Image (cartoon, helix red, strand yellow):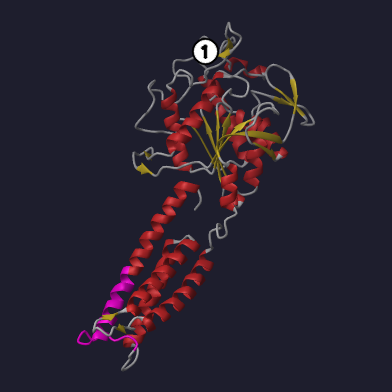
């Protein structure tokens, strides 16, 4: 598949996660022409704020009078800037179309998920903040959140979905939950569903689901992918999240609110969560996988249709007479089979429904010219009073039936192919 034909859906927990964890990958594929789409599960209302003038936005600090809603609004602006710098084609939060399953809704009635925050439990494991909102992502039923992810998957129809590993990368409860609902959402999307308006949406099977790899582990047996991405786009996107991180002057390091400097890198690695890269690669290498251009499809269908229609029309009236007195219109059978085969080949080879109709339409034109384009044609006779005339009329009817059947079969084949492979 050409990069410009690819669709990638990144599912993250908070604004800034997309830039820090996958920014180089997103920027690189956007530069290659792929459609990069971002789904963010929360607005990051419980994030820690670095700039002192904005400390009043942080829950728990003096001057903060809400549950993080104001900080969430501020971080939406940061996310908008970061997404633009990454080249994201479309971004939305859970609860915003298309990441909304109207049949499921939100049990909390808020229409969105709140950042769960994080604390350390007595067992040493990360847990939601003790005062996290009842409308937080971790408080919601997993199947509810997964249904909204599934709605987004059906709408975007990604060839690749990227999220976190099952441990969330570093254990943040929202990351762990995002991983679970993203994987579950991809599974649910393979079943029929509905869009935000309640209209039926075809199911979609995402060929590959990848997890961000926090730290490379050589003992991990799962397939690994490494992307040498766009450093410039990632750095610019990270800089947009000024409440959450600081970049060094030369851009070689960054620090979160803990003040610990980390090296900046445009190399991002992933581990496979679902799908078979070898099977996808084998299918990519199948001859004819690239969809024909409109011009190529037109030339192919007209040329093949003209040859097939001419041969079929000339032979349609051929009859084999048996010694016993009965006869077999083998020419009519052969002509129909030839026209049907060529029509289906053209439609499936070019992957265009209209192309499947061209040989049949050409057959009509050729037959009409033979029958009525001159006086006394013996190639196509339409006099119902003669046996050859009956064959001529039958040929016109079979051309119509063949054309209709070719279009219907090609359309069903293309639809099944899109569901199975994610290709157009």
Q: Is residue 50 left or right of residue 151?
A: right
Q: Position of residue 74 (x, y in %)?
A: 56, 25
Residue 386: in magenta span = yes
Q: How many marks?
A: 1
Mark 1: secondary structure: loop
Residue that numbered label 1 is attached to? 65
**Residue drawn at point x = 60 percent, y = 37 percent:** 83
Q: Is any part of residue 380 visible from this angle?
A: yes
Q: Position of residue 290 (x, y in %)?
A: 56, 58
**Residue drawn at point x = 53 percent, y = 68 percent:** 295
Placement of 143 over or under 312, stated as above or below: above
Specify start and end residues of the magenta stretch as a single range: 379-401
Placement of 315 over or under 336, stated as above or below: below
Residue 146 occupies quadrant: top left
Placement of 181 over or under 356, stated as above or below: above
- Mark 1 is surrounded, within 10 Å at the Cα level, by few (under 14), some (14 to 19) or many (20 or more) other residues, namely some
């Amino acid at each position: 598949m050409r990069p410009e034909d690819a669709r990638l859906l990144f599912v993250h927990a908070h604004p800034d996660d997309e830039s820090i964890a996958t920014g180089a990958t997103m920027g690189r594929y956007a530069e290659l022409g792929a459609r990069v789409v971002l789904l963010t599960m929360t607005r990051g209302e419980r994030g820690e704020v670095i700039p002192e003038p904005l400390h009043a936005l942080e829950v728990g600090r003096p001057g903060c009078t809400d549950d993080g809603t104001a900080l969430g609004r501020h971080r939406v602006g940061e996310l908008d800037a970061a997404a633009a710098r990454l080249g994201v084609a479309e971004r939305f939060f859970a609860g915003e179309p298309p990441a909304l399953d109207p049949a499921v809704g939100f049990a909390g009635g808020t229409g969105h998920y709140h950042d769960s925050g994080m604390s350390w439990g007595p067992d040493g494991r990360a847990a939601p903040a003790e005062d996290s909102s009842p409308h937080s992502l971790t408080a919601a039923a997993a199947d509810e959140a997964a249904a909204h992810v599934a709605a987004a998957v059906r709408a975007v129809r990604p060839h690749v979905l990227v999220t976190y590993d099952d441990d969330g990368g570093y254990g943040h409860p929202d990351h762990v939950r995002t991983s679970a609902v993203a994987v579950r959402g991809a599974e649910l999307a393979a079943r029929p569903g509905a869009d935000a308006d309640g209209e039926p949406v075809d199911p979609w099977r995402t060929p590959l689901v990848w997890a961000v790899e926090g730290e490379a582990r050589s003992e991990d047996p799962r397939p690994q992918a490494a992307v040498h991405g766009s450093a410039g786009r990632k750095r610019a996107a990270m800089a947009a999240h000024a409440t959450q991180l600081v970049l060094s002057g030369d851009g070689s390091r960054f620090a979160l609110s803990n003040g610990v400097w980390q090296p900046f890198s445009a190399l991002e690695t992933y581990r496979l969560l679902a799908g078979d890269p070898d099977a996808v690669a084998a299918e990519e290498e199948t001859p004819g996988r690239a969809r024909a251009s409109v011009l190529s499809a037109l030339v192919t269908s007209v040329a093949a249709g003209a040859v097939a229609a001419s041969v079929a029309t000339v032979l349609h009236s051929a009859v084999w007479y048996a010694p016993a007195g009965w006869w077999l219109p083998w020419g009519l059978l052969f002509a129909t089979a030839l026209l049907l085969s060529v029509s289906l080949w053209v439609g499936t080879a070019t992957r265009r429904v209209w192309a499947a109709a061209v040989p049949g339409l050409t057959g009509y034109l050729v037959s009409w010219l033979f029958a009525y384009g001159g006086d006394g044609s013996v190639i196509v006779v339409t006099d119902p009073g003669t046996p050859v005339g009956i064959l001529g009329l039958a040929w016109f009817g079979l051309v119509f039936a063949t054309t209709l059947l070719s279009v219907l079969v090609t359309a069903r084949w293309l639809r099944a192919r899109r569901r199975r492979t994610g290709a157009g």
